[in-house]
Image (tube, rainbow, N blue to C red):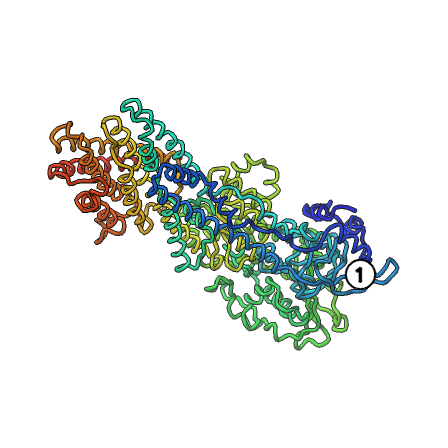
Amino acid sequence: MASPYALVADARSGGPGAPTVLQVLRGLDAGPRGLTEAEAGERLTRYGANTVPARRGPSWPRLFAGSLRDPFTAVLLCVGLVSAALASWGTACVVLVLVAVSGALRAYGEHRADRSMTALRDLVVSTATVLRRADADAAPVAREIPVGELVPGDVIRLGPGDLVPADVRLLRSYGLSVHQAALTGESSPAPKDAADTAGAGAGGVFGRPQLCFQGGSVASGSGTAVVVDTGERTRFAAAHGLLTTRREPSAFDRCVHSVSWALVRFMLLVPPLVLLADAALRGRGLATLPFAIAVAVGLVPEMLPVVVTTCLARGAAVLARTREVLVRRLPALHDLGAMDVLCLDKTGTLTRDRPVVDRALDGDGREDPEVLHWAAVNAWWTLQLADLPAPEALDEAVLDASGEDGRAAYEGGPAANDDGRTSHGGGPAAYEGVTAYEGVAAEPFDPVRRLAVAVVRTPGRLGRNTVAAKGAVETVLERCALTEEERERLLALAAREAGRGHRVLAVATATCPARLSRTPSPADARGMTFRGFVTLRDAVVPTAAGALAELAGRGVTVKVLTGDHPGTAVRACRDLGIAVSAGGVLTADRVDGLDDRELAEAAERTTVFARCAPEHKARIAAALRTGGHTVGFLGDGVNDLPALRAADVGISPRDAVPVVRETADVVLAGKDLAAIGHAVAVGRRSSGNITTYLRVSLSSNLGNVIAMLAAGLLLPFLPMLPAQVLVQNLCFDAAQLAFAHDRPHPAVLRRPTVLRARELLRFVTGFGALNAVADLATFGVLALALHGSGALGDAAMFHSGWFTENLVTQALVMLLLRAGRSTARGRTPGPVGWAAVALAAVGVALPLSPLGPLLGLTALPALYYVLLVAVLALYAAALAILRSRHAAVTEGRRGAA
């Protein structure tokens, strides 16, 4: 017996090699009469139950342990353990608490992702109607069985409202259409047909009309199908397999790792250098180890996990409160800020899920209201006489365009309504309303015939009926009395309209005796008079153009990944102001012919990717990431799961399939691009504050480390006691929590905020060296204030002077290196300004307070404060100059890039 999964894989191509009904039945060793009970039992043992595979998520302790794999968290943990071993209990407690909080937050986020398995099971039906036989000679009997007992080769029946219980191949179908929103995200039902000759639609394997998939539901019609795949081999269950695969590191992960490992390398060098230098010059050996550890800890921005979490959590809370945007994974907010490419489908995002009439043309390409009139007659009476639950999308567009009362209308050509639909106003009285006719019979549109036929009786024309046909251009033209030259000319006209991104319907009519029209059939629609074409286009979302312009202004490039025809996608893009160059369109067949490197290069210059299957979308997203972009992907169907996981940040609307919504990093209230633009702004605000914190913290810490190393070589005592180092770091870190509430400069929001390790290290090195110079200048101030360099032997005086200078200079750095608005632009200093003032006040007041002696600090002479003001003024001027130069160099590099 052939592998069932291989049969579906063969069907994906849609070419001549796709298996026929007979080939599928032979491969499954089955027949249209169904399996015997014995065969079904044997196959159930072989293939297993038809259930979504269960998977037990990792335990909380395991998730917590996994969270410590982050290099920065691991370093903090090691520092805390070493501090505890050396009896530095204050340092150890602070660091270990931060590690625990960071690990718990990350474990909680990963635990939420495991709940997506429950959403998968909720979509699976519990019973199915199957044909089974007692033995080989018995007649098949239809009965209900638990869906878990279905096996490959079973023959099942499908009717309106039924959920598809497995992946199946249709044997017979009668007007069948299936909702596949759980798989593709498309709201309109997909027509299905069992015929071997039915052509493939867009959307890859989901576009095959002969195949239905687990998770779909029957919208209309009925059918009989053979089960091809069950259990974990179904496309629906494959979504679970994607959830078990390890996701590639996101932009946030890559940034944190690169910065962390740079810090790790530096931190590992500090303690040995301090011990060696002190042992060589002072001979104190291991007695200096606590100080060496304190210096290493001083380099670490201990509050980084807390500051990052606070910045991102506050931004997520703002989005949830103001735009109903839910950020399920906090680091995804940083990735939104860093995003420079957004991939999305056309339908539902740029355009609505329904078409609108663009024009009605006669055979010469001129506008003709009569064409729309007869198209509306066909649509109205097909809907009424065929007892359809709702009009097809194209019929609904035709009826909308013809006017609410069913009258065809043209007064100066079509005009767009406020909702984006085309209206043709109230038409000439010569054209009777569609309700003025009397319906006789109708056959609705069928995906095989690709034609809808309605027969109506016209008032005042006794004994004669009118047949109105509407459908695919080729099908209608075959039924018209035309010469070969006329047919070729009309086909060229239709092709020209299709090339402009229009869907084209052909309309024809014929008259016939009433007795021949009682039961119409396709054979009756022969020798017809060609009326013309109705062209339709996708209605654009009214807010899409403004949202796209806003995203472009923020440096986000939009890439359209769609299963539609290239012309349709290009037309929608141009209607919305998206520039598409001559080489800016790439179809799926061309994507298949490119290797990963070539695809990465092609993706740079391509705007529209058409005829895309799920695997194409995922590969394109991965190629864009390979090219150095931070990629976001907006999707809502199971077929979007590969691309959602391939992107840096996955985005889905709230009404998406549950498993997709649970997998996405960001959930929107709807497919609203304006909400994405707002989320990008909030992400950049949060990321900008995190970047500012790292710049300020690391440059200050580096300057202190350099000064400590220099002081250790010059002084006969420790330049700062471990307790003083700890208090200083705690004061500085507490003040920097204010960055989570800062509002960055508007320039920060105009470009992606990517934290690049090399750029950060250049910044930290330059400003850290300047900070070290200020510290060394303070040593000279202390020497003058204490009447000679010999007075530096007073350890308490030195500790107090350097402690005050450190906190005051760090307050200056917070004000001058922040990415927010300058204090002069507002009436109040803002959270960062007040935090800097408080930090400087603590630095000045603590040595003078009763707590000073407990920390080994003492009061300083007045001359010290006078000289310190001079040092700080020079330091502030140097900071301003260096900041301006750094900004100019950075802009130059970005411009060159």
**Residue 236, position as x, y percentages in the image:** 63, 53
Please say if 336 is above or below 758: below
Residue labelled with disc 1: 132
Q: Considering depth in this image, is 800 or 773 the residue closer to the camera? A: 800
> Quarter of the image holding residue 264?
top left
- Which residue ends up furthest to the right in the rendered image? 137
Residue in the picture at 38% in, 51% down:
682
**Is 162 placed left or right of 246 in the picture?**
right
- Quadrant, the C terminus: top left
> Quarter of the image holding residue 357?
bottom right
**Residue 103, position as x, y percentages in the image:** 45, 47
> Quarter of the image holding residue 698?
top left
Please say if 298 is above or below 553: above
The crowding category of the residue bearing disc 1, from other C-alpha atoms within 10 Å (few below 14, some 14 to 19, many at least 20), is many
Amino acid at dot 1: Arg
**Residue 501, position as x, y percentages in the image:** 55, 52
**Residue 86 in sight here:** yes
**Residue 611 in sight here:** no
Residue in the picture at 22% in, 41% down:
808
**Is 269 placed left or right of 366 in the picture?**
left
Residue in the picture at 39% in, 59% down:
322
**Is 67 placed left or right of 173 in the picture?**
left
**Residue 611, position as x, y percentages in the image:** 60, 47
Q: Considering depth in this image, is 117 or 16 the residue closer to the camera? A: 117
Q: Considering depth in this image, is 95 or 540 the residue closer to the camera? A: 95
Mark 1: secondary structure? strand
